Image (cartoon, grey):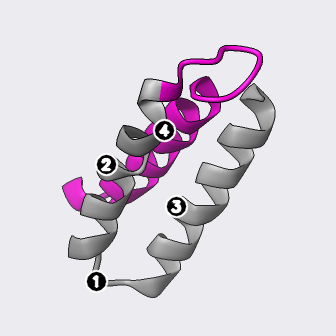
Amino acid sequence: MKRGSWRTSAAGVVSGALFALAFPPFELPVLAPLALVPWILALATEEKRGRGLLSGVLFGITYWCLS
């Protein structure tokens, strides 16, 4: 497994978790504008669309599970 192959997926999970923390029941609104930064930076350098799609799915699942 290449080093960069997991980076975009991990960024999606981290951003999903931060985004969930910005809304109830955690209510840390200061995280809302910062939550998407790791994911957007990872997507900007991602070359394969499939990994970008996977990171979006992981973002959504992480957000849904935590909120």
Q: Indicate whether 15 appears above or below 66.
A: below
Q: Nearer the viewer, residue 60 or 37?
A: 37
Q: Earlier in the sequence, mark 3 or mark 2?
A: 2
Q: Which residues are magenta?
A: 1-29
Residue drawn at 51 percent across, 80 percent down: 50
Q: Indicate whether 54 appears above or below 11.
A: below
Amino acid type indicated by mark 4: Ala
Query: Which of labels 4 and 2 is toward the front?
Result: 4
Q: Earlier in the sequence, mark 3 or mark 4?
A: 4
Does the stretch in magenta take in 20?
A: yes
Q: Earlier in the sequence, mark 4 or mark 2?
A: 4
Percent x, y of residue 2? 24, 60
Q: Is residue 60 left or right of residue 55?
A: right
Regarding residue 2, the answer to whether it shows in the image is: no
Q: Earlier in the sequence, mark 3 or mark 1?
A: 1
According to the image, label 3 marks what residue? Answer: 55
Residue drawn at 56 percent across, 32 percent down: 17
Does the stretch in magenta take in 65?
A: no
Q: Gap between marks 3 and 4, in whole Å? A: 18 Å
Query: Which of labels 3 and 4 is toward the front?
Result: 4
According to the image, label 4 marks what residue? Answer: 32
Q: Gap between marks 3 and 2, in whole Å? A: 11 Å
According to the image, label 1 marks what residue? Answer: 47
Residue drawn at 25 percent across, 60 percent down: 41
Q: Gap between marks 4 and 2, in whole Å? A: 12 Å
Amino acid type indicated by mark 1: Glu
